Image: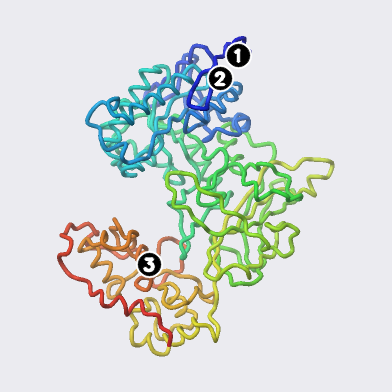
């Protein structure tokens, strides 16, 4: 059967095989017409006048084709092996990724030919075998060698060796397959990194860039500023990245709702068609993944735990409302059915200004304000997880946080609440615990069932961080500690309570003690959680100055290593050395006392001084700052 169709079965990697069309490869090349770069082939200019519409993933290929995408993306050969036949049948082209290690040791030695290095010799065999296997497929657009490998050395620069090694690999691939362009995918477009790539990676045909939110709108200008005039492709674009997002005063990420993400995707998609160097843009992620939360990047809801066993929600692998904006950008046409949009979420009647709130161990009423353009009735699915945030970098695998059961007393479902308004019972959640609430808004199945109509396969969503607060009560240890501070210690040692004064309320003093991690006090509910960037004259400020001016950050806890700013050091000290520093202000929307601006660092924290020299910070003060007040 394979021979009849002109297909050969070829070995790829242990345990993997691929069926590849034995036909002459379509010659893809990049050409410049005036200032405008275009993707072309022997058959003519591709895409929209040489700019390709891309879906950043390798699943849901039929949906990508239907929405107007011309290209999809992989990160490794195994993903090609599983999906290339479907892409060929649909007429989609693959930005074919070749995974390279993020191990720092692999990029330490670039003094000779990488074929003489045992590790890279074996890697080249794997890479060229993969290229050889797939290069004749009509679905291959180009190769991208490596994805954010600069994480191995320096995320904003990479290293000379990194780029020299990469260039040798590129040359090897071009020799094996001269019919397709070869590029690399960078984490952002930092100027220093772009200049090093320009100097040491001279055989790149194009540069791929992963960039999110407003930063993705600046990539072309960043490249031109660095003197790099290669064509570029936005290999991942989407919402504000979690690393750039605002955070709550307790350190949780504040995520945009799907409705807030729509203009992010639309703006970047449109920009690529107007930037003369941009040759493609891939919306990320065309599929689903857990990265920091269950909704941050996915354009399809494959979080099965949300919908399983919920008879009132018939929406397998719901599409995000973002897909409507992408289809409009790609084709100029709206989707036939409009997804819902979320306007606000309220907790006990108070509309959230940002996607975060605090709540005591109690019952609260949750309401989502959502609409659908045609006026279709809607419903919501609410779920809660503990806020367990992985420290994985660069999109590495993260485990999915499990749903917490029995939090919605009026719901027949064990793990979720159903409806636009539900009751959330937090009495079983731990005080000072951090959690995340999700709501998914879909068409009401009761409406869809009228006339045997099927519910559209789309949704809107919002994700909200929350923390369990508690106002100290008589008889509790925290209550006694706060009374002691107010009546005695605040007057005697005001520097222990930055932001509080002798006229502060009980709740305000409890808040300071919670932020300073003094005693056993949780954040109170009566006072919004606030931050405080340390100021001259405070013990925290003096300690940080001693660390930075004398280059002592490497001698402290690991969290302090490499810190160069007052705010960076303050956060590290707050998290690892209780009792010295409050949490610093880091973003818009936090209640700040007294300010939200970073304290100027006169030395920049970079002055080189010998360790062990200079002023010695009076560490004898630390036990006093750390002492628990039991009154």
- Can residue 271 be seen here? The reply is yes
Point 35% across, 59% down: residue: 559
Callout 2 environment at 10 Å: few (<14), some (14 to 19), or many (20+)?
Answer: some
Whether pointer 1 and pointer 2 mark residues with C-beta atoms closer than 8 Å, the reply is: yes
Identify the disc placed on residue 574: 3
Give the left or right position of residue 553, taking residue 394 as reference: left
Identify the disc placed on residue 592: none
Give the left or right position of residue 306, taking residue 563 as reference: right
- Mark 2 lies on a secondary structure that is strand
Residue 272 spot, x, y in % from top left: 46, 34
Whether pointer 2 and pointer 3 mark residues with C-beta atoms closer than 8 Å, the reply is: no
- State the separation of the CA atoms marked 1 and 3: 64 Å
Give the left or right position of residue 623, taking residue 628 as reference: left
Image position of 215 with respect to 357: above or below: above
Pick the front one: 201 or 268: 201
* Residue picked out by circle 1: 2
Point 25% across, 67% down: residue: 545
Q: Nearer the viewer, mark 1 or mark 3?
A: 1
Image position of 274 with respect to 297: above or below: above
């Amino acid at each position: 059967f394979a021979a009849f169709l002109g297909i050969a079965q070829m070995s790829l990697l242990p345990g993997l095989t691929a069926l590849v069309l034995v036909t002459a490869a379509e010659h893809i090349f990049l050409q410049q017409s005036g200032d405008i770069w275009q993707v072309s082939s022997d058959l003519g200019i591709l895409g929209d006048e040489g700019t390709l519409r891309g879906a950043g993933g390798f699943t849901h290929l039929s949906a990508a084709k239907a929405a107007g995408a011309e290209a999809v993306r992989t990160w490794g050969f195994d993903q090609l092996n599983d999906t290339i036949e479907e892409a060929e049948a649909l007429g989609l082209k693959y930005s074919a990724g070749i995974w390279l290690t993020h191990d720092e040791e692999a990029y330490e030695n670039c003094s000779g030919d990488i074929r003489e290095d045992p590790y890279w010799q074996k890697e080249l065999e794997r890479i060229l075998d993969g290229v050889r296997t797939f290069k004749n497929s009509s679905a291959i657009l180009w190769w991208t060698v490596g994805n954010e490998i600069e994480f191995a050395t320096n995320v904003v620069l990479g290293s000379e060796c990194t780029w020299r090694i990469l260039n040798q690999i590129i040359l090897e691939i071009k020799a094996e397959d001269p019919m397709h362009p070869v590029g690399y995918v960078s984490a952002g477009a930092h100027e220093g990194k772009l200049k090093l790539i320009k100097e040491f990676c001279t055989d790149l045909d194009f540069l791929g860039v992963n960039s999110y939110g407003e930063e993705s709108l600046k990539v072309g200008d960043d490249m031109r500023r660095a003197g790099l005039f290669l064509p570029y492709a936005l290999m991942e674009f989407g919402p504000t990245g979690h690393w750039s997002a605002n955070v709550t005063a307790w350190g949780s990420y504040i995520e945009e709702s799907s409705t807030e993400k729509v203009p992010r995707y639309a703006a970047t998609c449109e920009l690529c068609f107007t930037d003369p160097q941009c040759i493609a843009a891939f919306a990320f992620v065309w599929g689903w993944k857990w990265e920091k939360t269950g909704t941050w990047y996915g354009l399809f809801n494959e979080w099965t735990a949300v919908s399983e066993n919920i008879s009132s929600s018939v929406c397998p692998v719901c599409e995000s409302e973002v897909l409507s904006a992408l289809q409009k950008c790609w084709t100029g046409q709206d989707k036939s059915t409009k997804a819902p949009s979320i306007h606000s979420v309220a907790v006990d009647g108070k509309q959230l200004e940002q996607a975060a709130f605090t709540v005591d161990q109690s019952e609260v009423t949750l309401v989502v304000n959502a609409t659908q353009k045609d006026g279709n009735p809607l419903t919501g699915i609410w779920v809660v997880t503990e806020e367990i945030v992985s420290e994985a970098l660069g999109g590495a695998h993260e485990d999915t946080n499990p749903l917490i059961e029995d939090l919605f007393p009026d719901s027949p479902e064990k793990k979720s609440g159903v409806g636009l308004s539900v009751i959330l019972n937090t009495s079983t959640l731990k005080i000072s615990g951090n959690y995340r609430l999700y709501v998914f808004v879909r068409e009401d199945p009761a409406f869809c069932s009228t006339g045997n109509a099927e519910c559209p396969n789309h949704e809107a969503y919002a994700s909200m961080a929350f923390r369990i607060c508690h106002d100290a009560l008589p008889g509790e240890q925290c209550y006694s500690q706060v009374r002691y501070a107010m009546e005695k210690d605040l007057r005697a040692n005001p520097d222990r309570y930055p932001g509080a004064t002798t006229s502060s309320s009980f709740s305000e003093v409890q808040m300071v003690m919670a932020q300073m991690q003094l005693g056993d006090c949780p954040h109170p509910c009566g006072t919004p959680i606030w931050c405080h960037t340390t100021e001259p004259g405070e013990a925290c400020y003096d300690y940080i100055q001693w660390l930075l001016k004398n280059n002592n950050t490497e001698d402290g806890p690991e969290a302090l290593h490499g810190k160069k700013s007052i705010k960076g050091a303050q956060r590290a000290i707050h998290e690892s050395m209780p009792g010295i520093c409050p949490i610093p202000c880091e973003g818009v929307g936090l209640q700040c006392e007294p300010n939200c601006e970073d304290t100027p660092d006169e030395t920049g924290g970079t002055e080189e001084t010998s360790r062990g020299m200079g002023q010695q910070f009076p560490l004898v003060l630390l036990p006093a700052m750390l002492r628990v007040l039991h009154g």
